[in-house]
Image: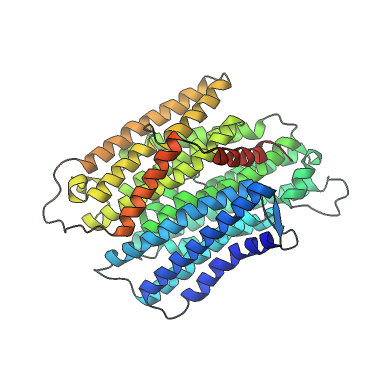
């Protein structure tokens, strides 16, 4: 009973945030409400993680909502990003609008959308019905689109429409995949109609029609892959990331893309079981992952906008996660490990980039020089984040990428590790080149003096510390969480 109430509270807490944000509070109080809601949500997620770790699946709302280790692990990613992003927003908006906070009306809208975004993401990870999961992902698109234009200008409006158009087309493809799944589910013995419950489907996936399920999975992979930022469907991502406010960019990169990829993860074992475990679905994910890494490597050297640079880094890392899942086995374990590492790294990177953008008054890389001198906190944080993202040891991303590479080598394939290493090497050189241009040299004259907020210092050091610890030590309990979550993807239970 307590577990059911906790699950329901995961949805009720952000809905409370929407309600409170509608009141005529000051702008600063709206942002504090967002912090409080994110903190309460994070505490609830931790409690549920412990409960699932000890007792297994939890159901609520007459079986319509459920949590297993895979979904609660992704909810942890939500907590890891939303709480620090909400805290970061306190200083970001305070320093970003002519020396003061935006109007209370604009902040009320931001607070309602931010908490609505949180609620829709939570529903993605709670839904047992795959149709409800689709609706929740579409809701994240509609809500987050208006977050992009918080700082309204011509470029942000253009980015919003591009995001809406491309992701809506992608989600339409995913809808067709769900329609095909419902057709395939009619073959399940005793079913009176189409079955969309993941728990029911997972128990009888061997009875699904294999050819229909393969067609459904292709639509799902293209549809949800568009929202997940996999190439070549990624074209909305650089514009949306570059124009959205920095806390929103961090949430996009660290959480929303994982939510879309989670939809693919739920369909993967169903498809493989229906096909007799021949690996076709894994191969499709592997191909899209390698394409994403290569595309990111091709476009990253030419970037001139610091947030677009980070956006292409996101394309690369979503490709790395896809490669790990596509390899299966130990690769899936490493991919889930990489998902957390990437979320933490992108918080560090976007927070630092956002601080430098406010300090320099520009997003252009060529106008950012001497960042280590001009703003040691943001400049140092950005350089460190790039080093982590390109896989410098001993940080966590190096370890998860090494595990994925090892999984590829264990399969005795040559092409996959060669393409993986080649793409990562190009990204390594180009990203490091951009970071050195920003960090080194003499800063421009007449830059305003930078004052560090305690919350900003804490965010930078906390993210860097966690990434260092996870790179040199994996607690046994965390390994068990990853093993249980990856087994849900690999084996139908």
Residue placed at 54% from the left, 33% from the top? 324
Residue placed at 74% from the left, 52% from the top? 196
Name which quarter of the figure residue 277 lies in: top right
- Location of the N terminus (image quadrant): bottom right
Q: Residue furthest bottom?
A: 24
37 or 298: nearer the viewer: 37
- Location of the C terminus (image quadrant): top right
Q: How many marks?
A: 0
Q: Residue furthest left?
A: 445
Name which quarter of the figure residue 430 lies in: top left
Up/down of 401 relative to 176, above or below: above
Q: Residue furthest right?
A: 190
- The image's colour scheme reads rainbow
166 or 251: nearer the viewer: 251
Up/down of 347 relative to 94, above or below: above
x, y (%) of residue 144?
48, 61
Q: Is residue 339 visible?
A: yes
156 or 86: nearer the viewer: 86
x, y (%) of residue 148?
42, 61
Residue placed at 35% from the left, 32% from the top? 428
Q: Is residue 40 left or right of residue 438?
A: right
x, y (%) of residue 228?
52, 47
382 or 190: nearer the viewer: 382
x, y (%) of residue 333?
57, 35
Q: Is residue 364 visible?
A: no
Q: Is residue 70 left or right of residue 187?
A: left
Q: Is residue 108 left or right of residue 270?
A: left
């Amino acid at each position: 009973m307590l577990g059911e109430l906790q699950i329901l509270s995961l949805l009720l807490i952000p809905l409370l945030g929407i309600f409170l944000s509608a009141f005529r509070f000051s702008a600063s109080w709206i942002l504090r409400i967002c912090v409080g809601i994110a903190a309460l949500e994070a505490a609830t997620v931790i409690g549920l993680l412990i409960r699932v770790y000890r007792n297994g699946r939890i159901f609520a709302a007459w079986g319509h909502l459920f949590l297993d280790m895979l979904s609660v692990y992704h909810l942890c990613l939500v907590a890891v990003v939303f709480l620090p992003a909400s805290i970061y927003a306190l200083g970001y908006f305070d320093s970003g609008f002519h020396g003061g906070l935006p109007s209370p009306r604009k902040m009320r809208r931001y607070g309602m959308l931010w908490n609505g975004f949180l609620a829709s993401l939570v529903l993605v990870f709670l839904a047992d019905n795959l149709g409800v999961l689709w609706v929740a992902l579409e809701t994240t698109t509609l809500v987050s689109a208006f977050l992009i234009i918080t700082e309204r200008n011509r470029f942000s409006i253009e980015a919003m429409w591009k995001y809406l158009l491309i992701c809506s087309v992608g989600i339409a493809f995913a809808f067709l995949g769900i329609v095909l799944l419902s057709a395939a589910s009619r073959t399940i013995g005793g079913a009176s109609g189409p079955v969309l419950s993941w728990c029911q489907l997972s128990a009888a996936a061997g009875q699904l029609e294999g050819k229909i399920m393969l067609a459904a999975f292709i639509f799902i992979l293209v549809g949800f892959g568009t929202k997940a930022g996999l190439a070549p469907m990624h074209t909305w991502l650089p514009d949306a990331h570059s124009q959205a406010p920095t806390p929103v960019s961090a949430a996009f990169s660290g959480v929303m893309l994982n939510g879309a990829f989670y939809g693919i993860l739920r369909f993967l074992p169903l498809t493989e079981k229906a096909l007799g475990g021949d690996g076709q679905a894994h191969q499709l994910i592997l191909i899209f992952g390698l394409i994403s890494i290569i595309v990111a490597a091709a476009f990253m050297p030419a970037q001139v906008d610091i947030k677009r640079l980070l956006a292409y880094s996101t394309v690369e890392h979503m490709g790395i996660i896809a490669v790990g899942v596509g390899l299966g086995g130990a690769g899936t374990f490493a991919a889930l490990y990489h998902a957390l590492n990437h979320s933490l790294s992108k918080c560090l990177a976007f927070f630092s980039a956002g601080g430098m953008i406010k300090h320099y008054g520009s997003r252009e890389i060529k106008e950012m020089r001497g960042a280590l001198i001009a703003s040691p906190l943001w400049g140092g944080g950005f350089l460190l984040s790039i080093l982590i993202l390109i896989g410098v040891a001993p940080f966590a991303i190096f370890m998860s990428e090494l595990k994925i590479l090892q999984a590829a080598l264990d399969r005795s394939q040559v092409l996959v590790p060669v393409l993986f290493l080649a793409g990562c090497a190009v990204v390594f050189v180009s990203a490091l080149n951009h970071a050195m241009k920003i960090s080194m040299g003499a800063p421009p004259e007449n830059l305003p003096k930078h004052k560090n907020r305690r919350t900003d210092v804490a965010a930078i050091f906390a993210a860097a510390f966690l990434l260092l610890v996870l790179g040199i030590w994996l607690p046994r309990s965390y390994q068990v969480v990853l093993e249980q979550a990856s087994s849900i993807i690999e084996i139908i239970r």
